[in-house]
Amino acid sequence: MAIGMQQLHGRVNAQLLTNVVATTNGEWVGVDGFYPFTVHVDGIVDATVQVRVSNLPTRPLDTAHAAQAGLDITGDDQFVVVDYPVRWVKCRVPTWVAGTLNAYLYGAQ
């Protein structure tokens, strides 16, 4: 299990964004094929968040964006469900004007 990820009794959780107040590429977190999981994004006032996923065998560079799961998130308190196995996940903030962004990953089997 990758750094930043916790797994307890068939559940996983990680914080993908923490009090972000600017654009960011995000940081890849390994989920090792665990699914389904949700990503909950809050704090958006005027910003865009993208949930990105990858199945590369090794951790991608943070500047690599890979495939997008779901649509751009532009409203506060939104969820994206990833219901297929992936190795890596991150949240990218390509545009930011206002808001303090947080993104939480949670999954249970």
Image (tube, rainbow, N blue to C red):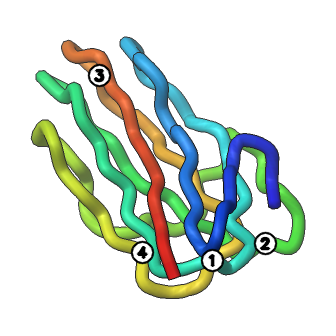
Marks 1/2: CA–CA distance: 15 Å
Q: Which of marks 4 and 3 is in front?
A: 4
Circle 3: residue type:
Trp
For the residues labelled 4 and 2, the Cα–Cα distance comes to 17 Å
Lower position in the chain sequence, tag 3 or tag 2: 2
Residue 40 location (% of width, % of height): 31, 50
Q: Which amino acid does label 4 sit on?
A: Val
Mark earlier in primary sequence (4, 3): 4
Crowding near pointer 2: few (<14 within 10 Å), some, many (20+)? few
Residue carrying label 1: 34
* Rendering quarter of residue 38: bottom left
Q: Position of residue 18 (x, y in %)?
A: 47, 24
Q: Nearest the camera: 98 or 13?
A: 13
The disc at residue 56 is 2
* Quadrant in the picture for residue 83: bottom left
| Quarter that holds the N terminus | bottom right
